[in-house]
Amino acid sequence: MFKKILFATSATQASDHAARVAFNIAKNYQSSLNIFHVMGVPTRGYSQVVIDVKTKEEVAVDEDYTAWVTEEVRTYYEKHLDGSFEHTIDVAVGFPAREILRQAKTIKPDLILIGGSTGDEDESVYKKNSAGSTLQKVAKAAKCPVLVVNRPAASFWGGLSNIVFGTDFSKTSDKAFDFAMKVAKALDCEVNVFHAIDITPLHTGKILTQDEIEQQIRESLRKIRARYEPRLKELKAYSMDVAEGIPYMEIVKYARDNMADLIIMAHHSRKVVSDDTRLGGNVEQVIVRAGCPVISINK
Amino acid sequence: MPEGKFCNKKPIDTAEGINELLSDTSGNNYYQEMKELDIDSDLLWKTIQNTCKSRTKTWLEICAHCGMCAESCFLYQVNGRDPKQVPAYKIQSTLGEIIKRKGKVDNQFMRDTMETAWSKCTCCNRCGTYCPHGIDTGIMFSYLRGLLYQQGFVPWELKIGAGMHRVYRAQMDVTDEDFVDTFEWMVEEYEDDYPGLTVPVDVENADIMYTVNAREVKHYPEDLAEAAILFHMAGENWTVPSKGWEQTSLAMFAGDWAACKMQVESVYEAMERLKPARMIGTECGHAHRATVIEGPYWAGRKNGQPPAESIHYVEWLAEALNTGKLKIDPSKRIKELVTLQDSCNYIRNHGLKKATRDIIKHIVEPGYFVEMSPNKEHNYCCGGGGGFNGIGLFRKQRNIALLTKRDQILATGAKLVLAPCHNCWDAIRDLEEEYEIGIRWSFLKPIVIKMLVIPEHLKPEE
Ligand code: SF4
Ligand code: SF4
Ligand code: SF4
């Protein structure tokens, strides 16, 4: 299902949850795993110095240093690299999001796997000047699905049985649905289609009456049925639900209540990338809050 | 050991040569070898006789040692008013001495001179505007750097940088293919948000030929996308050359005159090949100086002008805003105290203060712009000019040099600094890192994009 996975990592504890999922998928699907680490941020001027993302020290990057960092990454993951799957390790210099995208452009993976915080967990001066987080930028521009593991995943890939697919009926959502179906069939799991009606006054412009809300719920359910049910029938089990509230909250709650082990959603590239993750779009919010991994689909 | 393995008089002309020098971490061996490097005094003296302009000689002779230039130099101010930091002293004790001694100087002298040339002067040319005799020490320092480079006394990073220009015609190892490829990649990434966005490569007779800084291609490709977006929004007929796209010149910082010529000629060739109405460079100060102000002389152009009319990015942006090609949504203007870094290279040395102020009028809510003091052509260097920013050996001195800008910014009370120059941007970033005064800083492109009124026909369809 995933021949080639690009696993972008800080090679620190911050990426450990993501790492566990990455190694699991690679093992179970015989994927070749490219472990990719951005080691330092360069300056705007011409100096040879870069800021090491881990130590925050200024370092001179040369062949020796690169080899040393590569070795560090290997050592960090040593016990997982037991030969049960193919792997390569690459390190690069640059802004993490840009370099992850560049690497994806080069190796063309079927999946990018990324920890909740990859290289920008702190408030370094570099962070302040790169609009949006690594995660937002990668999810926005990637050409393949992006799997984000932000919090400890309850069950790992392989033991996957329950997918929540969140839809907003857009074209990109249809692509995300195709992908959810593909995963569900390959892994033989259940798909729960879910739509959340945004009732925040900011979105609706007014306070909706209960009748209006219920009307919308019925309509949305009809839409889900028409749009997805014919294909859902190919699966052993599925469900369809609609709820009202703040969309990302509803999805996170729904996933929790249904003990989902994966959420799949469309990422809307139109959304302006915000400087602040807390103000990011729905997907970002779900990623930050969900108890299970989230896959964001963009194109 | 006269000529070292790493440190010698030979310019670097091959990719292998660059890699070899890069492999000498921080130039440790390079500087070790420099202590043994011989001086070719005959060549040095002959070069001076052939290249030292009479203006320079006159300047050295007529200097009245009045010291009026002292206070004008930010490095003098910020280094405890050390008499050794007086511009006149700095140049007399280096270039002046070499000429006086007809090139017969020793190794220690050359190394001291290198330190002065690259860590005690950023070639900001501020002192020149205060000297009653019009003596411009910055210009003389640029000349001195050329002599030092010829003798192999040049900071490690700059020897590499000049080599990059010789090998790649760019300040980094970015090939012409990399450039076009990266630009296309960026446009592809942004075309969903900006339908119709393209990067026209090698189009003849376009209104604008755009040139960049190789660092944008290598590490900050969003800059390329932003430039494309703004040209697209303004409805410009623009192009980029697949060859001759690099506007910057580390060779200029290094004093590698031959490489300066090679670099700028590659841009001029592109102009001659594509015949654009105008050339516009990215938001970079020294790139403008190299390609537009000094370049014509390096390339021996008789009229002192590049082959096509060449303007700085801020001139184009001001024009696009003034003529309404780009429209700003007034509700999105900057509504916090904000200040502006005047780059020496195109403000003091090329008089573009009006263009930047015009831009400010469009993008900042009235009442929120605070000038630094002093400002415009009197502004101080960011602290990292002339190559200072990138030289590891002089990092300490550079960090002291940043204090001037730090205090200027603090005095404005602004937390946002507009820095339309790569080098200034870097210096300001570094000063935040070093002194943590809680500021943000930005180029103009990303700021303007956020507040644009997007014409109906260019909006993405939902
Ligand atoms: S102000 Fe001019 S004349 Fe006076 S010391 Fe400085 S360079 Fe010489
Ligand atoms: S050019 Fe600038 S840095 Fe150099 S001596 Fe003059 S004022 Fe000082
Ligand atoms: S970096 Fe900017 S301020 Fe500093 S010398 Fe260059 S143009 Fe001037």
Image: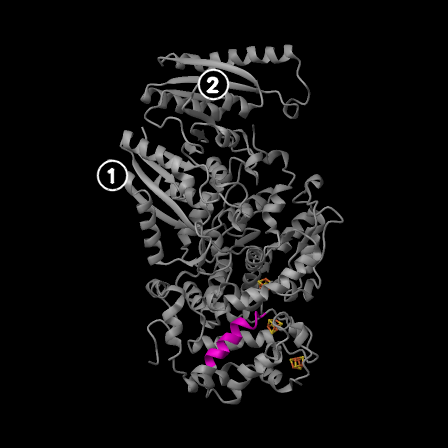
* Amino acid at pointer 2: Asp
Say whether disc 2 or disc 1 marks the residue closer to the N-terminus. 1
Q: Is residue B113 magenta?
A: yes
What residue lies at 26% left-to-right and 36% top-to-bottom? A85
Dots 2 and 1 on the same chain = yes
Quadrant where the image shows the C terminus of chain B: top right
Q: Chain of mark 2?
A: A
| Type of amino acid under label 1 | Asp
Q: For marks 2 and 1, give the CA distance.
A: 36 Å
Task: Locate residue B96, reporting x and y percent.
Answer: 55, 84
In the figure, is residue B412 to the left or right of A93?
right
The reply to whether dot 2 and dot 1 touch (C-beta < 8 Å) is: no
Binning the other alpha carbons within 10 Å of mark 2 as few (below 14), some (14 to 19) or many (20 upward) gives few
- Residue B99: give x, y in percent of width and height: 52, 86
Q: Which mark is residue A82?
A: 1
Q: For the point 47% across and 82% down, which residue is it?
A: B109
Name the residue located 60 percent from the left edge and 55 percent from the top edge.
B420
- Tell me if residue A33 is in the magenta stretch: no
Main secondary-structure element of the magenta-colored stretch? helix
Question: Which colouring convention does the figure follow?
Answer: one colour
Residue A201: image x %, image y %?
66, 23
Q: Which residue is mark 2?
A: A257
The magenta segment is B110-123
Q: Quadrant of ligand 3?
A: bottom right
What residue appears at the point 41 percent right and 63 percent down from the top-left corner? B164
Q: Quadrant of the N terminus of chain B?
A: bottom left
The secondary structure type at the circle numbered 1 is loop
Specify the subunit that label 1 lies on: A
The residue closer to the viewer here, A133 or A69, is A69
Please tell me in which quadrant of the rendered image residue B455 appears: top right
Q: Nearer the viewer, residue B218 or A214?
A: A214
